[in-house]
Image (cartoon, rainbow, N blue to C red):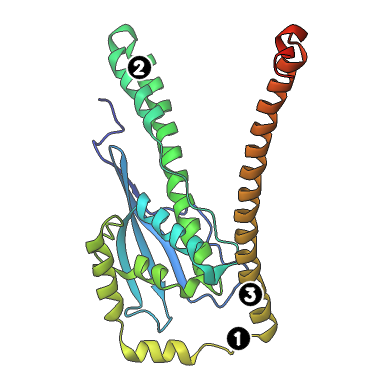
């Protein structure tokens, strides 16, 4: 199969995207994807973090993450009821290089029917298309993490810290993974936790009320939806009964009087 230069495609760090700080000049968590490696249907991202925040054990570190682990992080934030009312940054789309690879494969198969110049030109165009898509994929994954880091609440999420700092694969499917992650989280030093808690401002009473309202509202909506579903099912049952009754009455209306006389 024809592929750009190497069997595994690598992307060294270039200024491919701007940092997203959402006007927060004091953001002490800086994240970028310093390298990415494409192997068949998987893309491995090297996530580089530089921080002065005391909640982390080190000031600078790298981890390797798969796309599925980005989705895991997004889902954990999205499912957390404490974040009700917050806008969670959208998850990056799944990398899809099948189209470009298919074109490269077809070009390789038709090499004998093209002149050398035509072949080289088409190869360069397809490789440029592949590389552009690859860089875009890396950029979207990077921006997702930067938006979380710039958010005043989500940046303190425990799963986000694990995603950035845990050296091993998260292996997001399976019980052993949860145990590994739990064990890692417990290794965070007590001093760091105390500093983290000490730096937290008192919660704003207004926002606490709004948050509680949204949580209650969310529960009420779920209960109302369940009740509405029950009513809808009941109405459908009644409707089906009316249809059967209507059919019987219609049959009765068109029946011969002689056929009915024996019943009256």
- Earlier along the polypeptide chain: callout 2 or callout 1? 2
* 183 sits to left or right of 60: left
For disc 1, the marked residue is 203
Cα distance between the residues tagged 2 and 1: 64 Å
Quadrant of residue 258 in the image? Answer: top right
| Residue 84, position as x, y percentages in the image | 58, 67
Does any portion of residue 122 appear in the rendered image?
Answer: yes
- Which one is in front, 217 or 14? 217
Q: Residues within 10 Å of mark 1 (few under 14, many from 20)?
A: few
Q: Residues within 10 Å of mark 3 (few under 14, many from 20)?
A: some
Between disc 2 and disc 3, the foreground one is 3
- Which one is in front, 130 or 145? 145
From this view, report whether residue 74 is shown above or below residue 184: above
Q: Secondary structure at mark 1?
A: loop
Q: Quadrant of the N terminus?
A: top left
* 225 sits to left or right of 142: right
Q: Secondary structure at mark 2?
A: helix
- Which one is in front, 64 or 51? 64
Quadrant of residue 216 in the image? Answer: bottom right
From this view, report whether residue 180 is shown above or below residue 144: below
Cα distance between the residues tagged 3 and 1: 11 Å
| Residue 17, position as x, y percentages in the image | 51, 54
| Residue 47, position as x, y percentages in the image | 36, 60
Q: Secondary structure at mark 3?
A: helix
- Earlier along the polypeptide chain: callout 2 or callout 3? 2
Does any portion of residue 85 appear in the rendered image?
Answer: no
Say which residue appears at 36% left-offset and 65% top-offset: 163
Between disc 3 and disc 1, the foreground one is 3
For disc 3, the marked residue is 211
Say which residue appears at 43% left-offset and 81% top-offset: 53
Between disc 2 and disc 1, the foreground one is 1
For disc 2, the marked residue is 119
């Amino acid at each position: 199969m024809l592929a750009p230069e190497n069997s595994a495609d690598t992307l060294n760090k270039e200024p491919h995207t701007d940092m997203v700080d959402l006007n927060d000049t004091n953001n002490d968590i800086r994240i970028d994807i310093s390298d990415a490696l494409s192997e068949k249907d998987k893309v491995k991202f090297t996530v580089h973090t530089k921080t002065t925040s005391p909640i982390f054990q080190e000031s600078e570190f790298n981890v390797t993450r798969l796309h599925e682990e980005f989705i895991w992080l997004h889902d954990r934030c999205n499912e957390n009821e404490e974040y009700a009312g917050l806008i969670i940054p959208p998850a990056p789309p799944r990398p899809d290089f099948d189209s470009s690879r298919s074109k490269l494969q077809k070009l390789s198969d038709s090499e004998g029917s093209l002149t050398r110049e035509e072949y080289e030109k088409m190869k360069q165009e397809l490789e440029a298309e592949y590389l552009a898509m690859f860089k875009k994929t890396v950029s979207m994954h990077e921006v997702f993490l930067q938006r979380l880091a710039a958010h005043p609440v989500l940046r303190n999420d425990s799963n986000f810290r694990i995603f950035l700092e845990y050296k091993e694969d998260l292996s997001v499917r399976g019980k052993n993974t949860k145990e590994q992650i739990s064990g890692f989280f417990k290794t965070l030093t007590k001093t760091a936790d105390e500093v983290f808690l000490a730096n937290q401002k008192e919660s704003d009473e207004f926002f606490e009320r709004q948050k509680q309202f949204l949580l209650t509202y969310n529960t009420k909506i779920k209960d109302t939806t369940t009740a509405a579903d029950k009513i809808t099912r009941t109405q459908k049952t009644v409707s089906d009964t009316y249809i059967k009754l209507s059919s019987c009455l219609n049959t009765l209306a068109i029946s011969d009087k002689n056929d009915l006389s024996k019943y009256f």
